[in-house]
């Protein structure tokens, strides 16, 4: 009997883990698409696209402890001294709470900053809010794992 309970528990855990990795909820799919669009916008210094994704009260905390509001973050997005050749997320999980979504995962960025090469791996947490049918990111935090 204990073996049956153990096997059922393992199967239930596996099903839940697989469901989190391949979202079937349209809101989860939408949030992941928005995260990917954000990466593309940063690659191309498209501050207008980023502006459409982040809330007016957006707050960003970078891996070095720097905090920025929306205006500062958009200025940073426009900075051509930062030339990314790669901005990619991995292991992304979306946690939905009615009109709030928390996204957690890892990121990998590569490129040059002021002509010096860089390559970073880190973790991120983004908090999204749904208002009037539209999702916008209200907060983002990154933590460096490895340079």
Image (cartoon, grey):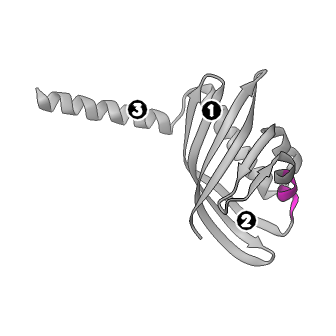
Name the secondary structure under disc 1: strand
Tally the numbered discs. 3
Please give left or right for residue 75 compared with residue 68 in the image.
right
Q: Name the residue under label 1.
A: 101
What x and y, as percent, mark residue 21?
Answer: 49, 39
What x and y, as percent, mark residue 134?
Answer: 77, 27
Disc 3 and disc 1: Cα gap in Å?
Answer: 18 Å
Q: Is the magenta stretch mostly helix, strand or loop?
A: helix
Pointer 3 and pointer 1: residues touching (CB < 8 Å)? no
* Residue 31 image-quadrant placement: top right
Q: How crowded is mark 1: few (under 14 residues within 10 Å), some or many (20 or more)?
A: many
Disc 3 and disc 2: Cα gap in Å?
Answer: 35 Å
Task: Work out whether mark 3 precedes mark 1 in sequence or the reverse, and give the earlier one.
Answer: 3
Task: Work out whether mark 3 precedes mark 2 in sequence or the reverse, and give the earlier one.
Answer: 3
Pointer 3 and pointer 2: residues touching (CB < 8 Å)? no
Task: Work out whether mark 1 precedes mark 2 in sequence or the reverse, and give the earlier one.
Answer: 2
Q: Is residue 63 visible?
A: yes
Q: How crowded is mark 3: few (under 14 residues within 10 Å), some or many (20 or more)?
A: few
Farthest bottom residue in view: 116
Name the secondary structure under disc 3: helix
Residue 131 in magenta stretch: no
* Residue 107 image-quadrant placement: bottom right
Please give left or right for residue 70 compared with residue 65 in the image.
right
Q: Mark 3 points at which residue?
A: 16
**What stretch of residues is rendered in magenta?**
74-79
Pointer 1 and pointer 2: residues touching (CB < 8 Å)? no
Name the secondary structure under disc 2: strand
Q: Which residue is drawn at 43% across and 36% down?
A: 18
Q: Residue at x 80, y 38 (%)?
A: 57
Q: Quadrant of the N terminus?
A: top left
Q: Can residue 46 be seen in this view?
A: no
Residue 85 circle label: 2
């Amino acid at each position: 009997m204990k073996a049956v309970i153990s096997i059922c528990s393992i199967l239930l855990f596996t099903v839940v883990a697989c469901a989190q990795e391949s979202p079937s909820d349209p809101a989860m799919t939408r949030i992941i698409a928005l995260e990917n669009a954000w990466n593309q916008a940063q690659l191309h210094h498209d501050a207008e696209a980023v502006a459409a994704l982040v809330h007016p009260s957006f707050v960003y905390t970078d891996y070095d402890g720097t905090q920025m509001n929306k205006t500062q973050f958009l200025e940073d997005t426009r900075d051509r001294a930062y030339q990314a050749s790669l901005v990619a997320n991995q292991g992304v999980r979306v946690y939905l709470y009615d009109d709030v979504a928390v996204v957690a995962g890892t990121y990998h960025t590569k490129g040059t900053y002021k002509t010096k090469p860089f390559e970073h791996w880190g973790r991120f947490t983004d908090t999204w809010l749904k208002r009037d049918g539209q999702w916008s990111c209200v907060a983002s935090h990154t933590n460096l794992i490895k340079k």
